[in-house]
Image (cartoon, rainbow, N blue to C red):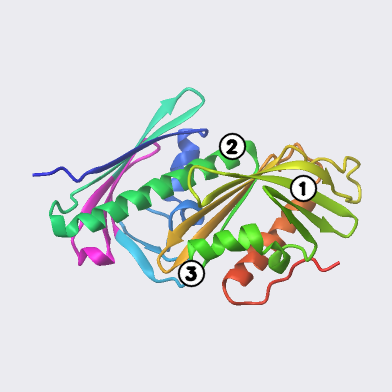
């Protein structure tokens, strides 16, 4: 019989305790996987939900927890029609961080069910990559946030690349391979690059003049990067933004974090959800 066990391994720039928190705490699970009703606990059932409408996405029971080294879940999703599988998480020390291994076993091994195996394999790949970004951002103190929207991944990608005037600023000068965004007397200029997939976008700030009260260096954004990560989520998408370099080393951290909360977490979410966005208009 064909072995349909899914195995993923990733090296993370975070301690085992930090990774364990992302795997078990309700307030962190939603940042890379699905929101949980409550923190995971040994012997207790769990439910992870769609971040768009709150519908149940996957569920089971936490069968074993040995913090911060090992955890085992029973696991199912709607298309499995009640068939329970097993998900195991193994955390090992690595130089400078943690080696995280995922094993998803007990999946059906029939030709009819192979589409489900492929979908789960693709899904786990994306989730583990999300966790990589989240833990790296937390370790560096970089701004990082995730929104769930009912728009398709293609629509989200288009909004980020070509519709910034609808959710960020009405003064956007697009050019081949980049864009300049202007706010009042301030501006930032980015070079665009593709990531590992069409839904991973890496923007490097080539020039910045951010005029902010009590921040003497208006060029602080120069050399920082915007890492956009888009993943399918049911009938919608999950969009993560990591501003690599926007951390406590920059004096503008507080102001710029509040800016991203407005333009990314609120305005882009509204734009992709059919609501009223709030771009900068002067």
Q: Which mark is residue 139?
A: 2
Taking the magenta stretch, the answer to whether it contains residue 218 is: no
Could you tell me which secondary element the residue under label 3 belongs to? loop
Magenta region: 60-87
Q: Horizontal and vertical percent for residue 204? A: 69, 42
Q: Quadrant of residue 136?
A: top right
The answer to whether residue 225 is left or right of residue 61 is right
| 167 w.r.t. 128: above or below | below
Q: Which mark is residue 177?
A: none
Taking the magenta stretch, the answer to whether it contains residue 75 is: yes
Could you tell me which secondary element the residue under label 1 belongs to? strand
Label 1, label 3: how far apart the Cα atoms are: 32 Å
User: Magenta stretch: dominant SS?
Assistant: strand
The answer to whether residue 255 is left or right of residue 36 is right
| 58 w.r.t. 274: above or below | above
The disc, 1 or 3, on the residue closer to the chain's N-terminal end is 3
Furthest residue toward bottom: 275
């Amino acid at each position: 019989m064909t072995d349909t066990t899914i195995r993923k391994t990733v090296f993370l720039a975070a301690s085992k305790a930090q990774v364990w928190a992302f795997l078990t705490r309700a307030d962190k699970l939603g940042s890379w996987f699905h929101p949980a009703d409550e923190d995971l606990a040994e012997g207790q059932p769990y439910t992870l939900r769609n971040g768009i409408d709150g519908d149940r996405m996957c569920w089971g029971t936490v069968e074993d927890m040995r913090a911060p080294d090992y955890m085992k879940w029973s696991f199912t999703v709607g298309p499995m029609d009640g068939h329970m599988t097993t998900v195991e998480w193994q955390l090992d020390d690595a130089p400078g961080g943690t080696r995280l291994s995922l094993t998803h076993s007990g999946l059906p091994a029939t030709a009819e069910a192979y589409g489900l195996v492929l979908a789960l394999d693709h899904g786990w790949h994306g989730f583990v990559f999300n966790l990589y970004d989240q833990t790296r951002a937390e370790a560096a103190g970089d701004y990082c946030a995730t929104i769930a929207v009912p728009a398709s991944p293609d629509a989200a990608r288009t909004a980020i690349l070509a519709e910034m005037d609808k959710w960020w600023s009405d003064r956007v000068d697009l050019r081949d391979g980049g864009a300049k965004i202007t706010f009042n007397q301030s501006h930032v200029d980015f070079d665009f690059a593709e990531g590992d997939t069409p839904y991973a976008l890496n923007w490097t700030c080539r020039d910045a003049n951010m005029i902010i009260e009590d921040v003497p260096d208006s060029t602080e954004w120069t050399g920082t990067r915007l890492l956009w990560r888009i993943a399918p989520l049911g009938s919608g998408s999950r969009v993560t933004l990591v501003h690599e370099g926007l951390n406590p080393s920059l004096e503008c951290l507080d102001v710029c974090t509040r800016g991203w909360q407005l333009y990314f977490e609120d305005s882009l979410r509204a734009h992709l959800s059919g609501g009223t966005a709030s771009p900068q208009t002067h």
